[in-house]
Image: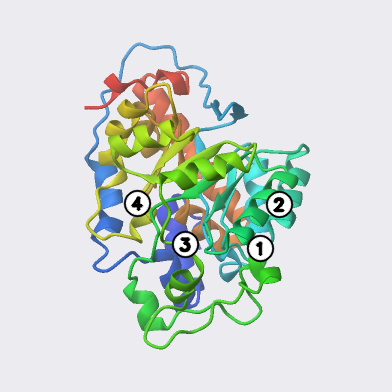
């Protein structure tokens, strides 16, 4: 078999290897999946305006994220239930991200504890830090506070508060499959609170039922201030696609914002992230660091995102496809592909550093 050369190659391998319910969970979007498809299509519509006669004999892909140096502007997005893809799950992803010199964001709905993931990442990196913890706010605020305290104690660098999921989008593939966590897996970070099981739900996705009963749909901007009041960690608001919401995020104490529509998994028909990025970046100005996820499949997509105002991108599905193929080595392969493609795209576009991807680079 020919070795995978692109993220799409990794996807094709994962589609063959993963059980149907796991593959559909990772791959699917909400309802008709128009936003899912629209995310990738939007990056394809963005056109680059390469500069010529620039010395690109050496390229520097490094940047900083919330003040921390990273080797490239490609971060690992928080994705749930990674042990459905590989027995090592989030631990394999953590080791690969650390080895690549980039940030891993860990999902609240991980199948490994945040402490175990921190240990795996730090051991591979040889130092502490370089990790974000993605936070869902539970109806039981004591549970939420306990998660925040644990993340601080384990040396996470930031909290990524997901704000686009008061309820779960209707993911029809999961409903048809009767999605539930396979035997032996749980929401590991919540198991000690009696909230670790994601069981089958009659006529629905088990995860949709879990979110409807466990998570707090009453969140407002005041809760961003509450979160800031209980933690010393910077808060990144994940799920903004509007300039006015970006300004509100800054006003309520956020340090960053992720332009995200949850990978097309929440509101079908929502704006593609590539189309929303410039508005958000313009609204953020110097008040917030801006990141983007959704549909990034090529290194050239990363370059476009930088030119449109993002500090870095987050990738989720590419990591999962690599994980399904070959655990830690597969995740490293996925990240390495994006790094190599970005390096070449920068050279061909006349960008010697990531900072050279300025707004005039895109049409």
Q: Residue at x 53, y 82 (%)?
A: 199
- Disc 1 is placed on an element classified as helix
Q: Which residue is mark 4?
A: 261
The tag earlier along the polypeptide, 2 or 3, is 2
Instruction: Give the label on residue 150, or none.
Output: 2
Which of discs 4 and 2 lies nearer the camera? The answer is: 2
Which of discs 1 and 3 lies nearer the camera? The answer is: 3
Q: Are marks 2 and 1 in contact (CB under 8 Å)?
A: yes
159 on left or right of 44: right
Q: Are marks 4 and 2 in contact (CB under 8 Å)?
A: no
Which of discs 3 and 4 lies nearer the camera? The answer is: 3
C-alpha separation, residue under disc 2 versus residue under disc 1: 10 Å
How far across and how far down the image is residue 173, in percent?
35, 75
Q: Are marks 1 and 4 in contact (CB under 8 Å)?
A: no
Vertical position of residue 318 compared to residue 234: above or below = below
- Disc 4 is placed on an element classified as loop
Q: Which residue is mark 1?
A: 189
C-alpha separation, residue under disc 4 versus residue under disc 2: 27 Å
Q: Which residue is mark 3?
A: 216
Quarter of the figure with residue 336: top right
C-alpha separation, residue under disc 2 versus residue under disc 3: 20 Å
How far across and how far down the image is residue 228, in percent?
56, 39
Near mark 2 (Cα within 10 A), the count class, few <14, some 14-19 or many ≥20, is: some
C-alpha separation, residue under disc 1 versus residue under disc 3: 17 Å
The tag earlier along the polypeptide, 3 or 4, is 3
- Disc 3 is placed on an element classified as loop
Q: Is residue 81 visible?
A: yes
Near mark 4 (Cα within 10 A), the count class, few <14, some 14-19 or many ≥20, is: many
Quarter of the figure with residue 37: bottom left
């Amino acid at each position: 078999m020919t070795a995978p050369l692109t993220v799409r190659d990794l996807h094709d391998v994962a589609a063959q290897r993963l059980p149907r319910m796991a593959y559909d969970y990772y791959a699917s979007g909400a309802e008709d999946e128009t936003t899912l498809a629209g995310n990738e299509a939007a990056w394809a519509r963005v056109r680059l305006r390469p500069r010529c006669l620039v010395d690109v004999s050496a390229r520097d892909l490094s940047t900083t994220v919330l003040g921390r140096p990273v080797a490239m502007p490609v971060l690992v997005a928080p994705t749930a239930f990674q042990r459905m893809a590989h027995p090592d799950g989030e631990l394999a992803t953590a080791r690969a991200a650390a080895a690549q010199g980039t940030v891993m964001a860990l999902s609240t709905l991980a199948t490994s504890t945040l402490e175990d993931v921190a240990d795996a990442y730090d051991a591979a990196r040889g130092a502490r830090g370089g990790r974000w913890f993605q936070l869902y706010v539970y109806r039981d605020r004591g549970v939420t506070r306990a998660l925040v305290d644990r993340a601080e104690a384990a040396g996470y660098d930031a909290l990524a508060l997901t704000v686009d999921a008061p309820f779960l989008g209707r993911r029809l593939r999961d409903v048809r499959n009767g999605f539930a966590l396979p035997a032996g897996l749980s929401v590991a970070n919540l198991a000690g609170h009696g909230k670790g099981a994601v069981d089958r739900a009659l006529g629905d996705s088990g995860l949709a039922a879990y979110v409807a009963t466990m998570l707090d749909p009453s969140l407002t901007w005041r809760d961003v201030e509450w979160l800031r009041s209980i933690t010393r960690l910077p808060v990144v608001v994940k799920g903004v696609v509007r300039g006015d919401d970006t300004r509100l995020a800054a006003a309520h104490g956020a340090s960053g914002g992720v332009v995200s529509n949850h990978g097309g998994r929440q509101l079908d028909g929502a704006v593609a992230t590539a189309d929303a990025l410039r508005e958000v970046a313009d609204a953020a100005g110097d008040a917030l660091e801006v990141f983007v996820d959704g549909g990034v499949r090529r290194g050239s997509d990363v370059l476009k995102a930088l030119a449109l105002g993002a500090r870095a991108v987050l990738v989720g599905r590419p990591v999962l496809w690599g994980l399904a193929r070959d655990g830690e080595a597969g995740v490293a392969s996925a990240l390495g592909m994006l790094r190599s493609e970005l390096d070449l795209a920068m050279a061909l576009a006349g960008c010697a550093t990531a900072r050279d991807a300025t707004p005039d680079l895109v049409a």
